[in-house]
Image (cartoon, rainbow, N blue to C red):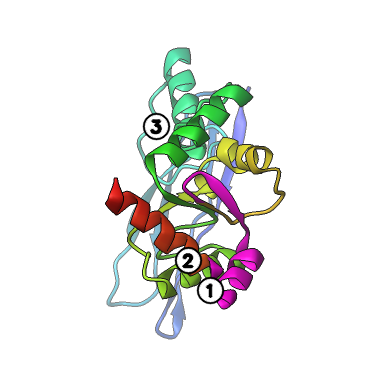
Amino acid sequence: MLRLFFFTAALVLNKGVGAFVSHQNNSIKGSSSSTILFVPHHQHHSGKTIRLWLPNGDDNDTDVPPPHKTEQEKEAALQAAIDAMFNGTPLDESPEEIRQRIDTLLKENDIVLFMKGSKSFPQCGFSDTATKILEQLNVANDYKAVDVLQDENIRQGIKEYSQWPTIPQLFIRREFIGGSDIMLETFQSGELASLLKEGKAKDEAA
């Protein structure tokens, strides 16, 4: 089927306006180039020939047609996008497998904070409060921060694991302490500092 492309161009040079030519391109499907001749009025400027690539309905600013992708390449690209979105976490991970991952995190680290964002860049006010409390207790380098925004399975799984509906969540030696409000209360009372010191003493004795 024949398609019709119209393109007009105008250029203001100093005080003069260049004359322009509309180029009409009647072509069969699959052809996608068009040439426009621009002739400015100003005596110090010469005309330009501009070649435009007009791909078949695609928005592309180059004059080289995009390479054809096989079905396998399309599937690979889609899978790569999904992996990037979920940070490599298996989409079909079972609840038991999620729980095992959480168990492993808690076994390998005495202090674990499940939070939104990272230690250096918390992504919510409650997570920011939690990190500041741990900094004040001089354990900023001693705890494991788990960014639940990077792992949707952990984000939901930790709520079921602890039976607590919100993030952040602090664990000390596999014991659930609470969220930022409880952390603040126990910090102000001195209880949180005692828990951390007790754990450190046990580690040194072992």
Which label number is shown at residue 190? 1
Q: Position of residue 119 (x, y in %)?
A: 42, 62
Q: Position of residue 24 (x, y in %)?
A: 54, 42
In the image, which is nearer the foreground, mark 3 or mark 2?
2
- At x 29%, y 72%, the residue is 45
Alpha carbons under labels 1 and 2: distance apart: 6 Å
**Quarter of the figure with the N terminus:** top right
- At x 55%, y 56%, the residue is 116
Q: Secondary structure at mark 2?
A: helix
The answer to whether residue 198 is seen in the rendering is yes
Looking at the picture, which amino acid does disc 2 mark? Ser
Which label number is shown at residue 194? 2
Q: Is residue 69 above or below residue 132?
A: above
Q: Which residues are magenta?
A: 172-191
Looking at the picture, which amino acid does disc 1 mark? Gly
Q: Is residue 115 left or right of residue 80?
A: right
* 10 Å crowding of disc 2: few (<14), some (14-19), many (20+): few
* 10 Å crowding of disc 3: few (<14), some (14-19), many (20+): some
Q: Secondary structure at mark 3?
A: loop
Q: Secondary structure at mark 1?
A: loop
Dot 3 corresponds to which residue?
65
Mark 1 touching mark 2, by CB under 8 A?
Answer: yes
